[in-house]
Each structure stands twice: as C-alpha cells, then as structure tokens.
Amino acid sequence: MSKKSISEITDIRLDFDSLNMGEVYDLEEALDADFSVIISGGVRKMKVVLELALITLRRDFPDITMEDVRALPFDILDLSGKDSDVVDPT
C-alpha cells in the first residue's frame, strides 16, 4: 500500500461531531481551552480551524504538521459540518 501524499488533499470536512474523545482532548490541549468554550466561539476561529484541520487530517496523514496545514489553500475547507453532497435547502 502506497503512502498518501499531502498534495492529494482536495477537501477537508471540519465537523466537531466527527471527533472522537481523544481528538477532543487534543483540541482542548492545543487551544488551551475547554471544549464548551471552543464550540461557543470563545477562541479565535482561524486558530480553531487550523487545529481542527490538523487533527482531522492526521487520521489519513499521521506525519502532517501544522506548517503543512497552514500551506493548504483555504478554499478546500468545508466548514458546514455536513457531507458535501447534501444540499442546504435554505
């Protein structure tokens, strides 16, 4: 099995509901804030986005770094927390 390349990343779905308990712990540690503060907007949004992207991408790319995440284009982010094939009726 060949190792996935970071250059293969074309979209990142960021969804708090998809985190496991270990990932929530890692997010709290990285942001030095309780999860309730994070989800209520008590931490700068871009900082949360970067950390959440790093944690999410580590599932498929265990060696990814924050520097790698920061270099990714912003337009590949899906911040809806929904599957990309679901159409929002509003």
Image (cartoon, rainbow, N blue to C red):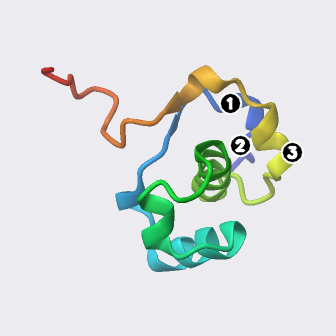
Kind of element beneath mark 2? loop
**Along the line of sight, which residue is nearer the eye, 42 or 51?**
42
11 over 46 or under it: above or below: above
Could you classify mark 1 by the number of other residues whose Cα lies within 10 Å: few (under 14), some (14-19), or many (20 or more)? few
Residue 67, label in figure: 3
As measured in the structure, the alpha-carbon distance from the residue carrying label 2 to the one carrying label 3 is 17 Å
Judging by the rendered image, the residue that carries numbered circle 2 is 4
Q: How many marks?
A: 3
Q: Position of residue 32 (x, y in %)?
A: 68, 73
Give the residue furthest to the front. Answer: 42
Mark 1 is on which residue type? Glu
Front residue of 83 and 50: 50
Disc ID at residue 8: 1
Residue under the point 73% across and 45% down? 2
Image quarter of residue 63 = bottom right
Horizontal side, residue 46 vs residue 72: left or right: left
Q: Is residue 81 left or right of residue 59?
A: left
Task: Residue at 34% x, 29% y: name it.
Answer: 84
Asked if marks 2 and 3 touch (Cβ < 8 Å), the reply is: no
Residue 78 in percent (x, y) is at 46, 32
Residue most toward the right?
67
Q: Amino acid at mark 3?
A: Glu
CA distance for labels 2 and 1? 7 Å
Q: Secondary structure at mark 3?
A: helix
Q: Nearer the viewer, residue 83 or 17?
A: 17
Q: Secondary structure at mark 1?
A: helix
Callouts 2 and 1 close, C-beta under 8 Å:
yes
The residue positioned 57% from the left and 54% from the top of the image is 56
